[in-house]
Amino acid sequence: MYVVRTDANTPLRGASPNIEKKQVQLSAIRENFIKDQHDAGMNSIRLIWFEAWQKAAGYDAFTDFSNPAEVEHCLAMLETYVNLCSKYEMYCIINFHSAFDKVYDETYATQMWTIVAAYFKNRTHVAFETANEPSNNFNTWIGNTEMQKYANIYNLVKSVAPNSMQFVLTPNRLPDSYPTAIDLAAKLSTLASIDWTNTVVAYHLYGGSLISIRNLHKKYPALPSENNFPANSGANKDPWGGVSLDGDYYTSQTCEKLGIGWFHWAITNDCNCYEGWYANWPLMLSDALNRGWYWESDNLGEKDIISPNAPSELKLNSINATRANISWKIPTDNKGVLGYEIFIDGKSLGKTAFNTYTLSGLLTETSYLVTLKARDLAGNWSKESEILDIKTQQNIALNKTVTTSSVSSTTYQGNKAVDGNTSTQWRSSNDDAKPTITIDLGGRYTVTNLFLDWGTNFGKNYQVQVSDDGLTFLVAKSLSNQNGAYDEISGLAVAGRYLRIMVTSRSVANAGVFLKELEIYGNALSTSTGFQQMEDEFLLYPNPAVNQVAIANILSNSAISIYSIAGERVFHQEIIASNNLVIDINNLKNGLYLIENRAGSYSISKKIIIQK
């Protein structure tokens, strides 16, 4: 196959930074954006001169080539990127980004390339892509009238920059039937004398097949100059999806296997945002590391043989019955760390580009030894990290008794939310405005954390409530503006036999909520009435408190008192008949208080903050 290769005999790989005249100033072009791409193994950028699209779409954010000041600004922006590419030994393809399925503006393209091609003609690492998805109607495109425009632009660039490589045509897809990209290239060859030793058919992979790719590369030098994640995927759910080929999730993976090069659209912007490098590149890198399609960086100088330092400060962030989330300090390396491999009990579990990882598929109440290694861009691996010893917990909600405020049908009963099977779920009825699900834990527990795995419809706002008798519930935590999927609620310190989730606002109005699994974690409370247990189990919440405070696990025949920081007793209640008490504190001012639980000559005090 005919492919484009670098001086290091590697495929072109890169992102596509944008230039928009009125949105981008010279000071906004960050050197680190290009450096970070280089450090990640990219050897090229496809520089999107978006002003052609702006003009075709009717906006005024484009260069007026009759205005010397605007021409100067245009060239300065382009040259800033060209110089950064030169500094980091990367190629730069300047793209005239014509608008998809709009009339190709030959007049504006002529103005632009007359100046730009002449200005950069002696920069050996610069190439020119003269169009971008100019037509969705290939039958019209292949006609003499339309194709003559591209022949004219080819001849123009060839005349002013005869030694510069040109990327031509750039259709949005590769059809398998006439007219194909091969037919377009053949037609162009009849209207211009194409030098195919220095000309490449660019194309985008928003449609096509392995057969159409191979057929094109067998006939002409070609490069896939744009592809994307599958539709509605990636960090920002980009709707402009590419194709998945050969069983690969990423089109770039297929291109990497074929050795034909690629430019990925969703890593375009200098931000952790929509189509941003910092949002999407780590996802792509993690996939490349895990699936084994990551590449070696171009070796243009002395080979890097220095290994990174081992990861350190391993930390367990959360753990439940089958999953654990860990993080660690990013180690140092002379060139920068690329990714990590995670090991459990000495066996490889997976790879990631992030310094955090979720271990899944673990066994309940089982201990594991976790270690890591770090890898740099040259493929050097660090020594193994220190050991992190973890132990999974027991889900105390599993197969417990459940009551719900409603169900949509017998298929979706409440017990489906605690059966340990995420393929089943509880669904409330559509007319239940505030659906609830209550778990009877079968005894009193101190609850520490929860995991809720929601279905398509979820609780947007909801409360976690606890009770000892299943009748009177206290709000332990309120959550708002949730986005569904998987909610982890940690840092709880509430006690009770019953735990209830009350949804106060649904993600879909007038529709039920779908809860695939509710996991609860905590420790059983002793039923002993000895004073030693009082110190271990005396709990109060919430803290800080606003309107009320709950005190749990109080011994019988004791007393509760609240004292201000000055020692004044502001609340007192003798002979507590229950081991739970809820106190109204609306009459107390903001500040620090002591709550004392006294039984005979024994007492214990805890601090609480009132903050309204």
Image (spheres, rainbow, N blue to C red):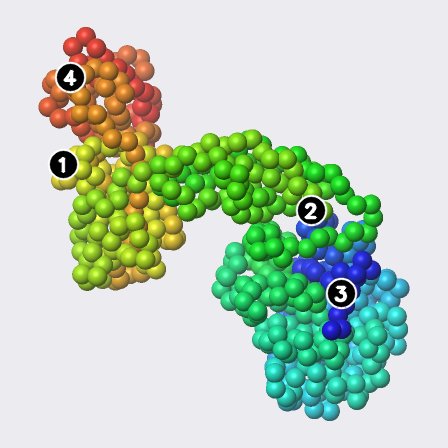
Q: Nearer the viewer, residue 111 or 137?
A: 137
The N terminus appears in which quarter of the rendering? bottom right
Q: In the rendered image, which residue does mark 4 sit on?
A: 558
Measured in 3D between alpha carbons, the distance from the residue under mark 2 to the one under mark 4, in whole angstroms, is: 66 Å
Measured in 3D between alpha carbons, the distance from the residue under mark 3 to the one under mark 1, in whole angstroms, is: 70 Å
Q: Which residue in the rendered view is the most extreme toward the bottom?
A: 144
The C terminus appears in which quarter of the rendering? top left
Are the residues flagged by discs 2 and 4 in contact, CB closer than 8 Å?
no
Measured in 3D between alpha carbons, the distance from the residue under mark 3 to the one under mark 4, in whole angstroms, is: 80 Å
Mark 1 or 4: in front is 1
Q: In the rendered image, which residue does mark 3 sit on?
A: 93
Residue flagged by tag 2: what amino acid is it?
Answer: Gly
128 is higher (above) or lower (below) than 432: below
Q: Residue at x 85, y 69 (%)?
A: 164
Tell me which label, 3 or 4, sits earlier in the chain: 3
Tell me which label, 2 or 1, sits earlier in the chain: 2
501 is higher (above) or lower (below) than 1: above
264 is higher (above) or lower (below) than 549: below
Q: In the rendered image, which residue does mark 2 sit on?
A: 379
Are the residues flagged by discs 2 and 1 in contact, CB closer than 8 Å?
no
**Circle 4 SS class:** loop
Q: Residue at x 83, y 81 (%)?
A: 194
Q: In the rendered image, which residue does mark 1 sit on?
A: 469
